Image (spheres, rainbow, N blue to C red):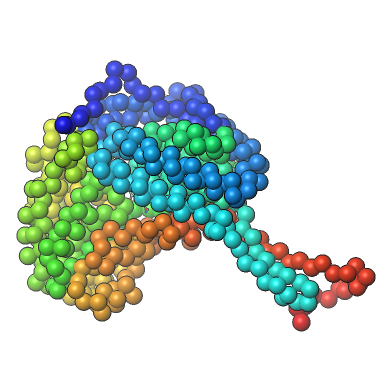
């Protein structure tokens, strides 16, 4: 049976979450939240003032005093409870994602499950925070390192993973003993408030996790705040660059992940059906609104025609519809403006010299912000459809003659998030892993998002900063090192010595 979301009689009011409770906004400024499948407004989210951001920071600052003293054993217990609660109730949050983002329910559940893996990793926090100890570095002297939390840290997140990307940040940050202020996307903010309520239910002390909604005003208040020690950002490249430059100029630690243009190379020896399945899945899943989506196939040599035929044959079978309809495989785009922007690349492609092989503007469901999958051929550097991150269900194909040309395209691209190669030749695949300038590489894997015990991040304009998110680099990002040199000599042997301390 197909479920559909009815338009609510009243708009849902989405509040901030500060110091363990919902707090209504006072700015008088707010944003509309839509159900992308119907195109109707369903909610209204408060936009924070500088003072409201400050209130969240003060709540986090106060909570930090106690939180950092909680034993690792108790903190780990709490993480196990959080893991269990989210696992039990993941369908609730998945439905919120469908209602505000538009992705299909199975994909929303997949998002929550991948986020949960980061929480599971954090359940091992006592091990993750273990340090090193060197006994007898000099006679009677030992040296050891410890990692301590930074204090209040903040996360600013994009619309496309409203539950998972915040989990990449708050879970390791809190596990390491920091307290957290989240500024989620204003387009689909409900998952963050749901998370706050769940964390409270799990027993997280008030003030450890706070949410302030908003736009540039709230982001700037976070970047300017003297009591925020570090900022994690995920979003588009221009804003990532701005956040990184502003935060670091204010003396904050910052990791800012930006946009992407992920190329998938298909070599002449690849299994064409497998490559076509992968390209269709990775280009059109979540309507192409994934930073790891494949947006550009690079077909090497004679494989191009056969590959394009195989992709074209699969596209009409992709079922586009309301995310709550279990038969839907691809939902709408997040807003009307974004849908229209994505459609403009298809509109303008012929004028730039590309061919529109499948036009997703045709036959898209009437209501809501839908587009069907589009396929462009002969897309080349210099065209907007090649240069821009389209962030929608538009797959471009570039034809090249050699492997070297294919790799050069990727290495000359300003982005370096994910990339993939499809081949049966292990030697070429290994060479690709060695040559390619991107942070996440798939070998016959189109969306190589690292598991939670590795770290996620791109190169070049896809990441500003020197630490990737979650995994071991996440733990490093949210802690700072201290090295202790210690001795317990007999006071009777003590004497004044103005020389520089020696170990020999
Ligand atoms: P966005 O950059 O528009 O917004 C991200 C965050 O920045 C939001 O919280 C938003 O409120 C805030 N923001 C927007 N404009 C701002 C401004 N002028 N000043 C200060 N803050 C501002 O990104 P989006 O549209 O929400 O998300 C899609 C983008 O995110 C894509 O480019 C995608 O590739 C990228 N993304 C990257 C990764 C990654 O891991 N590299 C992951 C997910 C999404």
Q: Residue at x 43, y 39 (%)?
A: 85
**Which residue is situated farthest in the right direction here?**
492
Please tell me which residue lies in front, 367 or 88. 88
Q: Residue at x 76, y 82 (%)?
A: 504
Residue 409 in the image: state x and y as whole percent. Answer: 25, 67
Q: Is residue 352 visible?
A: no
Taking the image as shown, residue 7 lies to the left or right of residue 359, namely right
Please tell me which residue lies in front, 336 or 130. 130
All told, the count of numbered labels is: 0
Q: Residue at x 53, y 43 (%)?
A: 78
Residue 192 in the image: state x and y as whole percent. Answer: 42, 36
Whether 103 is drawn above or below 48: the answer is below
**Which residue is situated farthest in the bottom direction here?**
504
Taking the image as shown, residue 321 lies to the left or right of residue 426, namely left
Whether 352 is drawn above or below 217: the answer is below
Residue 114 in the image: state x and y as whole percent. Answer: 36, 50
Taking the image as shown, residue 497 lies to the left or right of residue 432, namely right
Q: Residue at x 47, y 32 (%)?
A: 197
Residue 42 in the image: state x and y as whole percent. Answer: 30, 26
The image quadrant in which ligand 1 is located: top left
Q: Is residue 182 visible?
A: yes
Q: Quadrant of the N terminus?
A: top left
Taking the image as shown, residue 464 lies to the left or right of residue 66, namely left
């Amino acid at each position: 049976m197909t479920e559909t979301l009815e338009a609510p009689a009243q708009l849902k009011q989405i509040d901030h979450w500060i110091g363990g409770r919902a707090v209504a906004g006072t700015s008088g400024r707010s944003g509309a939240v839509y159900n992308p499948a119907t195109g109707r407004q369903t909610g209204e989210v408060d936009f924070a003032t500088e003072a409201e951001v400050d209130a969240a920071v003060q709540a986090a600052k106060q909570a930090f005093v106690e939180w950092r003293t909680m034993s690792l054993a108790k903190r780990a217990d709490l993480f196990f409870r959080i893991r269990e609660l989210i696992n039990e109730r993941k369908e609730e949050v998945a439905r919120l994602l469908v209602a505000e983002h538009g992705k299909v329910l199975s994909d929303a559940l997949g998002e929550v499950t991948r986020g949960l893996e980061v929480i599971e990793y954090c359940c091992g926090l006592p091990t993750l925070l273990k340090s090193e100890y060197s006994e007898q570095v000099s006679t009677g002297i030992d040296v050891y390192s410890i990692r301590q939390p930074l204090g209040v840290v903040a996360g600013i997140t994009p619309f496309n993973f409203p539950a998972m990307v915040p989990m990449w940040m708050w879970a390791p940050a809190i596990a390491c003993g920091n307290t957290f202020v989240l500024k989620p996307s204003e387009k689909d903010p409900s998952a963050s408030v749901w998370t706050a309520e769940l964390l409270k239910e799990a027993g997280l002390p008030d003030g450890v996790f706070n949410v302030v909604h908003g736009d540039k005003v709230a982001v700037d208040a976070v970047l300017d705040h003297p009591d925020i020690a570090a900022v994690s950002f995920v979003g588009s490249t221009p804003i990532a660059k701005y956040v990184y430059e502003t935060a670091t100029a204010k003396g904050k630690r910052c990791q800012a992940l930006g946009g992407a243009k992920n190329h998938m190379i298909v070599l002449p020896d690849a299994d064409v059906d497998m490559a076509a399945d992968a390209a269709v899945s990775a280009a059109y899943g979540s309507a192409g609104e994934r930073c790891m989506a494949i947006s550009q196939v690079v077909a090497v040599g004679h494989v191009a025609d056969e590959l394009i035929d195989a992709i074209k044959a699969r596209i009409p079978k992709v079922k586009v519809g309301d995310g709550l309809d279990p038969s839907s495989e691809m939902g709408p785009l997040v807003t009307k403006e974004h849908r229209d922007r994505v459609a403009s690349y298809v509109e303008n492609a012929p004028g730039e010299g590309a061919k529109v092989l499948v036009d997703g503007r045709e036959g898209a469901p009437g209501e809501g912000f839908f587009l069907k999958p589009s396929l462009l051929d002969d897309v080349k550097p210099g065209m907007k459809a090649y240069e821009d991150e389209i962030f929608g269900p538009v797959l471009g194909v570039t034809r090249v003659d050699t492997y070297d040309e294919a790799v050069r395209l990727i290495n000359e691209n300003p982005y370096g998030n994910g990339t993939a190669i499809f081949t049966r030749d292990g030697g070429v695949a290994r060479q690709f892993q060695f040559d390619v300038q991107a942070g996440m590489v798939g070998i016959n894997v189109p969306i190589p998002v690292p598991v939670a015990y590795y770290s996620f991040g791109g190169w070049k304009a896809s990441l500003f900063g020197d630490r990737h998110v979650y995994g071991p680099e996440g733990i490093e990002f949210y802690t700072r090192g201290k090295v202790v040199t210690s001795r317990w000599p007999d006071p009777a042997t003590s004497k004044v010595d103005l020389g520089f301390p020696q170990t020999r």
